[in-house]
Image (cartoon, rainbow, N blue to C red):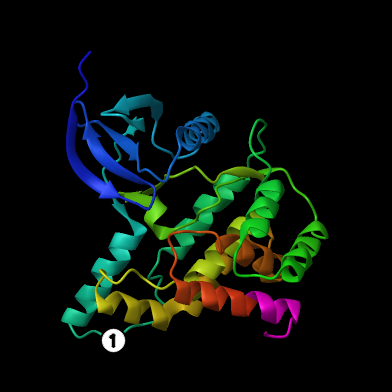
Amino acid sequence: MVHRLGHKIGEGGCAEVFEWEDGSKIVKLAKPNTVTAALEAELHHCRIASSCGLPVPQPYDLVTVEGRSGIVFERIDGETIMKRFVDRSVEQYRMQQPLDIREDFVNARITAQLFHQIHSHSVAHMPSQRENFKHNILAAQYLTETEKAAVIDQLDRLPMKQQLCHGDPNPGNILLRDNDAVIIDWNNASTGNPEADLAEYIIMIRYAILPPHLPHEAMVALDATREASIHIFMEEYENLSGIGYADIEPWIAPVAARKLIADGISDAEKKMLIDEIRRRLDTPYP
């Protein structure tokens, strides 16, 4: 069978996404910074999520296209929460409408519902969230060895759970199709504590600096609604699970430290994360 690579429809830090065959599928082709083993792991994680009945694109198989490894998935026709947020920000500015921070600008309720659904599953044959965190924290270049040891000590004192976690609750990873949400990019999935996913979301909303190619109006809207969005997200998740903000607080420093190895966040954002980690560790600045 001759595979047909169609139009490019998206791109992230580690892969490009193209139409595949008749257009009912997509292929996610790795960039040079992504090894085949990472794609194999993502395919495995997505298959487990699919077997749990979670709203994910149907995963098909690994392929090689012009020397590049890739994964074939079902194509989901929808828009990401990020795109909807950006479009809404620009439209409100164009219409000269004031921002109402009580509105759910980043679909935080839908995100909370989706992650509660994910966290309701316990699965086997998945990476250990805690071991992944320790590996990432030790690899972080921006902390001293003493700081890394202090963060890991804090992590070791936290209770251990065995629930399915996604690992990257980015609004760009959640597609909205009618009234349904579908979540993609399972490469960071693991078995561990839901509180880590929640801390990741809180840190991202609180500190994210949007890419410079996005309209300025989106950054203005994000800055105006950050804490209100976190409140909406946590209110919904706590109503569903009983897990509140106080349960997530101890996870902020370990998750922030783990994020320091990410390629997709700017040095300015990493500086804010370092400040947050050091404040929580009560470590004096050098």
> Which residue is at 39% across, 31% downward?
58
* Residue 264 showing in the rendered view: yes
Q: Specify whether 96 is left or right of 68.
A: left
> Which residue is at 68% across, 42% downward?
128
Residue identified by numbered label 1: 98
* Residue 195 showing in the rendered view: no
> Which residue is at 67% across, 44% downward?
163
The C terminus, quarter of image: bottom right
Q: Specify whether 55 is left or right of 243.
A: left
Disc 1 crowd rating (10 Å Cα; few below 14, some 14-19, many 20+) is few
The residue stretch that appears in magenta: 277-286
Residue 7: image location, x then y, percent: 16, 40
Q: Number of labelled discs?
A: 1
> Which residue is at 67% across, 51% downward?
135
Residue 20: image location, x then y, percent: 23, 30
- Is 285 one of the magenta-colored residues? yes
Residue 250: image location, x then y, percent: 73, 68
Relative to 151, say whether 6 is above or below. Answer: above
Q: Residue furthest top?
A: 1
The N terminus, quarter of image: top left
- Is 271 one of the magenta-colored residues? no
